[in-house]
Amino acid sequence: MTEQEARGFLSLSEDDDLYDVYEEQLFEHRKFFLSKAPVSTLFEGRIARMTKLQEAFEVLGGTVDHQENPMQEAIVPATSILETYLAFQKSKNSLKMQLSNAQSVPELAHAARALVKLEHDNAGAWHAEFPEEETVIVSREPDPMYLLESIKQYAEQGGKTFAQLKNQENNPPALLVQEMKRLSLLFKKY
């Protein structure tokens, strides 16, 4: 990438400060990762654009210190839906904090990839086979509070394990069945 191409990529005018433009674009990427469902194809496309941002920034002489946090440990799916969900949410919140605090493209890319891996590991616990004629939107996550309430409601009805949910024992709430289908599709295709 030439200096002129880098300026064009960053939309950098003579009056702009390189570091301000970098931080502004980093903020937009950070906002994207925090607001979208972690679907690998979606996130990898954004990471590729961020890599170009980093390249343009460095071509123009920009440097930034970065530290990569260790990869988040994958949740260990328990048989209990509630335990698995709580562990997943704890790990997800930790990764979202890393995303919020990322000060460079490498840090942001690392945390985004860790979030995708965490989502995939979680989806593995929920995975069940369903006919594909049903319309499920993978990127539409349910409200975590409603999902937690559904999990608790299901537990009160005697449904505590993924095996019970997958067999649809104890009349699981519709939201849980929908989430199982969404995560099953995510696990299978993404």
Image (spheres, rainbow, N blue to C red):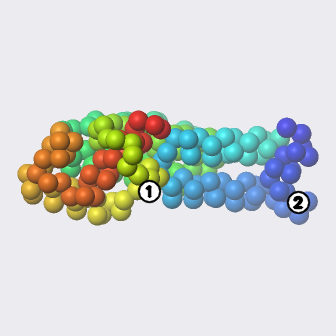
Can the viewer see residue 75?
Answer: no
x%, y% of residue 164? 15, 43
Horizontal and vertical percent position of residue 58? 78, 41
Residue beneath disc 2: 13
Residue 16, by quadrant, is bottom right
Quadrant where the N terminus lies?
A: top right
Q: Amino acid type of disc 1?
A: Arg
Is 16 placed left or right of 72 in the picture? right
- First in residue order: circle 1 vs circle 2: 2
Cα distance between the residues tagged 1 and 2:
38 Å
Left or right of residue 182, residue 68 in this image: right
Which SS class for mark 2? loop
Q: Is residue 135 left or right of residue 26?
A: left
Q: Quadrant of residue 19?
A: bottom right
At 88% from the left and 63% from the top, the residue drawn is 15
Q: Quadrant of residue 22?
A: bottom right
Q: Which mark is residue 28?
A: none
Q: Secondary structure at mark 1?
A: loop
Q: At which x and y percent is residue 31?
A: 57, 59
For badge 2, the amino acid type reads Ser
Q: Please identify, in this view, whether the residue under mark 1 or under mark 2 is nearer the observer.
A: 1
**Is 96 or 62 nearer to us in this picture?**
96
Residue at figure coordinates x 62%, y 54% from the top left: 29
Q: Nearer the viewer, residue 182 or 114?
A: 182
Callout 1 crowding tier (Cα within 10 Å): few <14, some 14–19, many ≥20 = few
Q: Residues within 10 Å of mark 2 (few under 14, many from 20)?
A: few
Number of callouts in the render?
2
Which residue position is annotated with label 1? 140
Q: Position of residue 20 (x, y in %)?
A: 74, 59
